[in-house]
Amino acid sequence: MRPLLKNTPIYEQIYAVVRQIPPGQVATYGQVAAIVGGCTARMVGYAMAALPYDTDVPWQRVINRQGKVSPRSSGHGSAVQRQILEAEGIRFDRQGRVDFEQVGWPGPDWAWLERHGFHPMPPLI
């Protein structure tokens, strides 16, 4: 039996959540942090930056809350991220933002969350 994700290091939890974001959709750093719990949007950003070049984690699908690709210290990483997203069908407006209503990821389904030890709060009625 596999251990629950909630019992693994925080970066591994972050990567597991990000792997759930399908092509053509994006999530924010804060959204991923809220799903994982116990971490911040900045920690999610650090986790994305720590990934190796040949990763299976779709890091490009995590953007900032303004709907923009965050600047990278290396300079060219932002352009690469945008190019990859555009190749997946993501469109940016003139201000470099995406429309979250069109391409925002709603998050993993409840069954995935439960199966991996994440316990979401029930929706408010």
Image: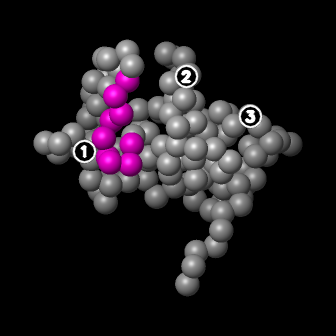
The secondary element bearing badge 1 is classed as loop
Q: Which residue is mark 2?
A: 51
- Decide: few, some or many residues near mark 2? Use Cα within 10 Å; few <14, some 14-19, many ≥20: some
Give me the C-alpha separation between circle 2 and circle 1: 24 Å
Near-viewer residue (4 or 42): 42
Describe residue 33's horizontal placement relative to residue 3 as left or right.
left
Give me the C-alpha separation between circle 3 and circle 1: 32 Å
Which region shows up in magenta?
Answer: 64-72
Label 1 is placed on what type of residue?
Answer: Arg
- Decide: few, some or many residues near mark 3? Use Cα within 10 Å; few <14, some 14-19, many ≥20: few
Residue 82 locus on image (x, y percent): 29, 31
Residue 44 locus on image (x, y percent): 55, 37
Label 3 is placed on what type of residue?
Answer: Pro
Location of residue 88 (image quadrant): top left
- Tally of numbered discs: 3
Identify the mark nearer the N-term, 3 or 1: 3
Residue 20 is at least partly visible in this image: no
Near-viewer residue (24 or 40): 40
Asked if the residue at tag 1 contacts the one at tag 3, i.e. Cβ–Cβ closer than 8 Å, the answer is no
The residue drawn where x is 54% and y is 17% is: 52
Q: Which residue is mark 1?
A: 97
Near-viewer residue (56 or 118): 118
Mark carried by residue 9 = 3
The residue drawn where x is 33% and y is 35% is: 69
* Quadrant location of the C terminus in the rendered image: bottom right
Asked if the residue at tag 3 contacts the one at tag 2, i.e. Cβ–Cβ closer than 8 Å, the answer is no
Residue 66 in the magenta stretch? The answer is: yes
Residue 64 is at least partly visible in this image: yes
Identify the mark nearer the N-term, 2 or 1: 2
- Decide: few, some or many residues near mark 1? Use Cα within 10 Å; few <14, some 14-19, many ≥20: some
